[in-house]
Image (spheres, rainbow, N blue to C red):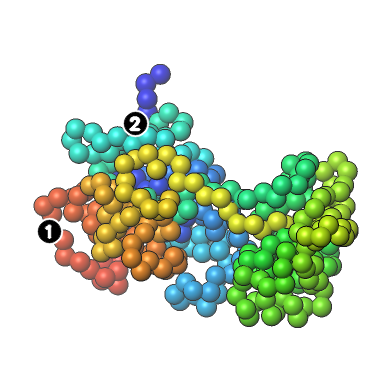
Amino acid sequence: MAMVIHQTDAVIVGAGPVGLFAVFECGMLKIRCHVVDALEAAGGQCAALYPEKPIYDVPGHPQILAADLIERLSAQAAPFHPVYHFGRTVVALERLDDGRWRVGLSDGQAIEAMVVIIAAGVGAFGPNRPPLPGIEAYEGRGVSYLVTRREDFRGKRVVIAGGGDSAVDWAVSLAELAEHVMVVHRRPKFRAAPDMVARMQGLPNVEMVVPYQLHGIEGENGRLSAVSVATLDGAVRRLAADALLPFFGLASDPGPIAQWGLEMERHAILVRQQDCATSRPGIFAVGDIAQYPGKLKLILTGFAEAAAAAHAARAIVHPGEAHHFEHSTTSGVPTA
């Protein structure tokens, strides 16, 4: 069977918030986009890790849930009819003789485009799992590495392990629903925002289990009944529990991107700040995967980078065409 090769103007790698906004910015400049993402739906980390977590630093929204932000960004991109390739990864990148790029996908298809915009966040990511024997049998039931529905923890005894922002933020959030929340950390000092730590420590149904670390789990048929914790001296304590949430950070890997010949530094792609161009012509990087001096890893920074990359890409996609920059209030947006 012949390989299916799609033709477009730009390939956007990553359908997180910055990738979705890049679709909008490209659309406003008459750049057609195909979007590739390893997940089964748009949203990136916002959808996979914290869809019900509020975000406070998106301009114009004093507070917005991550899932709602993704829904609105998808609606904003929709008038430009992007083609999504979900559940697929980019496995190959080839420069063609005419200067275009051929992007090979994991399903055997390929996309040819004038430019590639990498908005892959931290790359492929997964949780750092605690080394507890038999924990695999409880994953997806009693043990979870992310919270997608707060309601799942209503009335439950929840053990949260970790001392960073995720552990503290979810302890505060789930305390509104859970019967009891126990926070296990190897030392009394937490690495999270001080005001959130103070809120957590002041909640009546949140118990600090310090200085302890995870030791073992108990249960039957994938149903969790208890978590054992231990001090460095070996003193063991048993915590009756219905759910365990280990928050020990994410292990990220740029995956095949690292083999594309781009100049990189610590799993990040080095770009020119003014237009987010990489070391290879026609390839741009935006969002958390892009790095330059003074970079702030914020969603709003990624939005600005997406706009800069799209305007630089326009000169490649539409060479020689005069461009009179217009604000959206003047040009408007096509109706879907």
Residue 14: x and y in percent read 44, 49
Residue 192 x %, y %: 61, 71
On the image, the x and y values in percent for residue 225 come to: 88, 52
Which of the numbered marks, if any, corresponds to residue 322? 1
Three-letter amino acid code at the position of disc 2: Ile
Q: Give the distance between the C-alpha atoms of the residues marked 1 and 2, in whole angstroms.
A: 30 Å
- For the residue pair 124 and 109, the one nearer the viewer reads as 124
| Percent position of residue 171, x then y | 72, 68
Q: Which mark is residue 5?
A: 2
**Cβ–Cβ under 8 Å for marks 1 and 2:** no
Residue at x 27%, y 38% (from the top left corner) = 101
Name the N-terminal-most of marks 1 and 2.
2
Q: Quadrant of residue 154?
A: bottom right
Foreground residue among 269 and 306: 269
At numbered mark 2, what does the secondary structure look like: helix, strand or loop?
strand
Q: Residues within 10 Å of mark 1 (few under 14, many from 20)?
A: few
Task: Check the picture and name the quadrant holding the C terminus.
Answer: bottom left
- Is the residue 308 above or below the residue 36 in the image? below
